[in-house]
């Protein structure tokens, strides 16, 4: 349970950091930008609350225990998001339509309307263009306890966006917590993520950490060196290389 809370907390944090870029690219109005920022930030808290109160089984609706003022604010956000979706026209770009549905999905999620949020997110990912929404939709599916659905969605997203480090990490965490991935499977997934993501330094660092937990300093040093070489601006990676070389 702790792993799943952290997994979804990290994903939600990623959305809050990346959303301004997505919105500016889509050219949405200022009020909508503010709506997205507010919803993405609050998503962090709601994810933790939902995970500590949910029963087992597929969850289609959840009580987030919102205070009256939050409930009212989220309902207003939902009205704005629904109006934005209702105003979608045929000549709108796929990115614009996808973004509007993603805002609706977030608003429904915050109110605990998981099934409605799922329907909105499904329309978003069907455009195959909206980068952050795969993490958001994944976050929703794990909150619904649809772990197999989350697994399939992560794979679908990674086929389109293989450099999505956060989605790789979420998938690996899911495989460990819900599908009993052992050390061998974890190693396979980490190597797959590293190679398919164009050898991102953060994933090289993940491999370094993994091999240290497996008492394999040779392989650990190898991947810490890769991380340090690819990201010289991150002193931490070089420090790990020095630490292991001393040993």
Image (cartoon, rainbow, N blue to C red):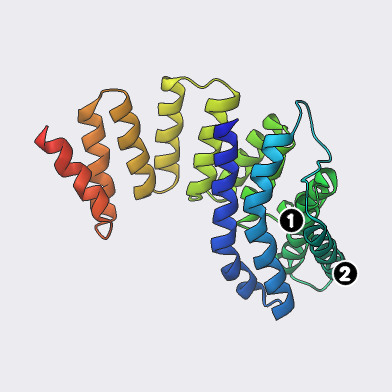
Seen in the picture, residue 70 relative to 145 is either above or below; the reply is: below
Q: How far apart are marks 2 and 1 (CA)?
A: 14 Å
Would you call the spot at circle 2 few (<14 residues within 10 Å), some (14-19), or many (20 or more)? few
Quarter of the image that includes the C terminus = top left
Q: In this view, does 6 lie to the left or right of 209?
A: right
Q: If you read the primary sequence from the N terminus, does the residue marked by circle 2 or circle 1 appear first? A: 2
Residue at image coords 51%, 22%? 181
Quarter of the image that includes the N terminus = top right
Query: How far across and down, in percent of the image, does residue 183 sit?
Result: 42, 21
* Disc 1 secondary structure class: helix
Residue at the left extreme, as displayed: 246
Residue at image coords 46%, 23%? 185
Seen in the picture, residue 181 relative to 132 is either above or below; the reply is: above
Q: Can residue 29 be seen in this view?
A: no
* Disc 2 secondary structure class: helix
Camera-nearest residue between 95 and 87:
87
Query: How far across and down, in percent of the image, does residue 241 sit?
Result: 18, 43
Mark number, residue 83: 2
Query: How far across and down, in percent of the image, does residue 216 sit?
Result: 25, 25
Residue at image coords 25%, 42%? 224
Give the residue pinned by disc 1: 106
Seen in the picture, residue 51 relative to 103 is either above or below; the reply is: above
Q: Is residue 234 left or right of residue 51?
A: left
Camera-nearest residue between 51 and 57:
51
Could you say which quadrant of the image residue 95 lies in? bottom right
């Amino acid at each position: 349970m702790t792993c799943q809370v952290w997994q979804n907390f990290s994903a939600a944090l990623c959305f809050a950091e990346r959303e301004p870029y997505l919105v500016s690219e889509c050219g949405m109005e200022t009020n909508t930008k503010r709506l997205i920022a507010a919803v993405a930030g609050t998503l962090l808290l709601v994810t933790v609350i939902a995970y500590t109160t949910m029963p087992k089984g597929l969850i289609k609706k959840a009580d987030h225990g919102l205070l009256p003022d939050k409930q009212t604010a989220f309902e207003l956000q939902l009205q704005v998001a629904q109006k934005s979706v209702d105003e979608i026209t045929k000549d709108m770009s796929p990115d614009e339509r996808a973004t509007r549905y993603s805002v609706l999905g977030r608003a429904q999620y915050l109110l605990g309307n998981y099934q409605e949020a799922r329907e909105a997110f499904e329309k978003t990912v069907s455009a195959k263009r909206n980068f952050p929404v795969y993490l958001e939709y994944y976050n929703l599916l794990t909150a619904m306890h649809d772990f197999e659905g989350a697994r399939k969605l992560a794979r679908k997203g990674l086929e389109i966006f293989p450099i999505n480090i956060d989605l790789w990490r979420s998938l690996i965490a899911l495989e460990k917590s819900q599908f009993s991935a052992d050390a061998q499977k974890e190693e396979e997934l980490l190597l797959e993520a590293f190679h398919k993501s164009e050898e991102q330094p953060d994933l090289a660092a993940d491999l370094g950490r993994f091999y240290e937990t497996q008492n394999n300093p040779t392989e650990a040093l190898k991947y810490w060196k890769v991380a340090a070489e690819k990201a010289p601006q991150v002193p931490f990676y070089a420090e790990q290389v020095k630490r292991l070389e001393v040993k």
